[in-house]
Amino acid sequence: MQILMLNVPHPSIGSSISDHLPPLGLLSIAGPLIDAGYCVKLIDGEIGTRCEREVLDRTEAAAPDIVLLGHCGSTSAHPVIARVAQSLRLRLPDVVIVYGGVYPTYHWREILATERSIDIIVRGEGEHTCLRVINALVANDDLASVPGIAYRNGEEVVSTPRAPLIQNLDFYRVAWELIDHQQYTYWGGRRAIGIQFSRGCPHHCTFCGQRGFWTRWRHRDPAQLAMELARLHREHGVEVVNFADENPIASRSQWKAFLEALISQNVELTLVASARADDIVRDADILHLYKRAGFERLLLGTDNTDEETLIKIAKGSSTATDRQAVRLLRRHNILSLATFAVGFDVETDRDYWRALRQLLVLDADQISIVYATPHRWTSFYSESSERRVIQLDLRWWDYKHQVLATQLPTWRVFAWVKVIEATLQLRPAAIRRTLRHQDLRLRSAMRWYTGLGRQVWPREIRNFLFRERRTNNGPTVRELWGDPQEHEGFAMAVPSIKTQVSINCKSRNE
């Protein structure tokens, strides 16, 4: 039984110009399969030419029995995955195609109804579920016995009860042996990996689906993770670790234990991660451990600069806390990357002008501007259900492109975003830190980030003017996607007994 993990080329600008991290999700699925005795290979379409035809040629040459598809950029990668699956079905008619990720977890009904090339969808965490799917396929058992999946049975779509949560995140391992570590770099060409310390988040931000998808916050054993990172450094030369968690530092005690365990390993690693500003303030007395462990940058999910908006999106933080976190990190020689989301409300020129002034006061080292995106499994979807959608192409639903209409024309929103970015990155303080930061490593990191910006900017402008097609009179959010799914709570929530959902499986285009 030949199993192939396939990571498709992603359409985003970042995927085409920047360093790449290994496909952590697929590698996490592969570990249990290899340990169960299966032959597993990986084709990473993000490495090399990024040509779909070449990826298909390599897949066909591998002659797999089962192809597992997935991507960390779940929603925006779906059109590519659907296209690749269709081509694979023509080339390999008998191959079983299994698809997993956040987007298919929630949109399994529509996908199985319209994408006849996809056979099985894994909903939620995949390590245990995928292993059970493969075991059932090999033994020719009924897939109805496998929790946490949806599949097509003739013209009927079948969903099974939700799979139980993985309680022990250390029970399954990541199949690092499937990759050539030399091909994966970050932070300016340094050998890198992505890793998870935890899954989920204890907070209830309306725009984020982490809590719903992962259900509750869980973490790995701090000492075991520290040993794994040390081994990867010593055996494979890994220099940079990018934490894929939304909120790895949610538990002060467990995070402190991890920092101390990693320090005791005595390895020189560069660490980057996301964090909440209030947790950074909470950890003011142990930030020296962050630095000793190797942290060079923390992405602060500040998300907005307006107090009313922060309350509306249930952020549970404040602008004063955000400013305090930035200053604490600077005091400990750790870079801060602040996020600002456009489009939570129907914004005006005055709102963007106020945001610019407040971001200048925040004074973070770097800025990342994103666009609020109404995914069906979040509370924000319900809040924005009657707003118009101006971008119908899922490839651009990647948080870096405007999806929802505002009072301003699209070109003016885009112009404001570029003005804010340019003002913040070209102000004297930012230039001074980039050119003359006292820490040579951080100076190098700042220059790398600035260099990325110089590559991204022209492409974003060119795409906005010539590639991205928008509509001035699009459907409402509800008209586009239907009823919200936040009421399900748990990502894989279905009735406690097997349900069979009859869906017309003919494509809408037929």
Image: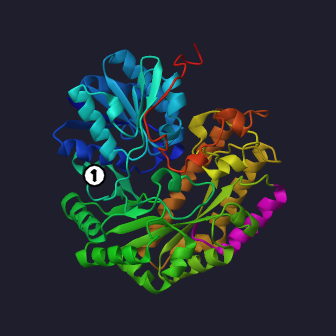
Q: Is residue 29 visible?
A: yes
* Residue 362, magenta (yes or no): yes
Residue 219, by quadrant, is bottom left
> Circle 1: is it few (<14), some (14-19), or many (20+) Cα within 10 Å?
some
Label 1 sits on a secondary structure element that is loop
Percent position (x, y) of residue 459? 59, 43
Q: Main secondary structure of the magenta part?
A: helix
Q: Picture coordinates of residue 177 (x, y %)?
A: 21, 48
* Left or right relative to 345: residue 38: left
Q: Nearer the viewer, residue 416 or 489?
A: 489
Q: Which residues are magenta?
A: 348-366
- Residue 103 position within the rendered picture, expressed as x and y whole percent measured from the top left: 51, 40
Q: Is residue 71 left or right of residue 330?
A: left
Residue 166 shown in magenta: no
In the rendered view, would you say 92 is above or below 440?
above
Residue sitting at x 36%, y 58%: 195
- Quarter of the image for the C terminus: give it: top right
Colouring method of the image: rainbow
Q: Name the residue that disc number 1 marks.
A: 174
Taking the spot 50% from the left edge, 84% from the top edge, the residue there is 284
* Residue 469 in view of the camera: no
Q: Amino acid at mark 1?
A: Val
Asked which quadrant contains residue 169, the reply is: bottom left
Lateral position of residue 479 relative to residue 291, left or right: right
**Residue 139 percent across, percent down from the top left:** 21, 28
Q: Nearer the viewer, residue 121 or 471?
A: 121
Nearest the camera: 127 or 275?
127
The residue depicted at 27 percent of the width and 43 percent of the height is 30
293 w.r.t. 388: above or below:
below
Q: Nearer the viewer, residue 277 or 107?
A: 107
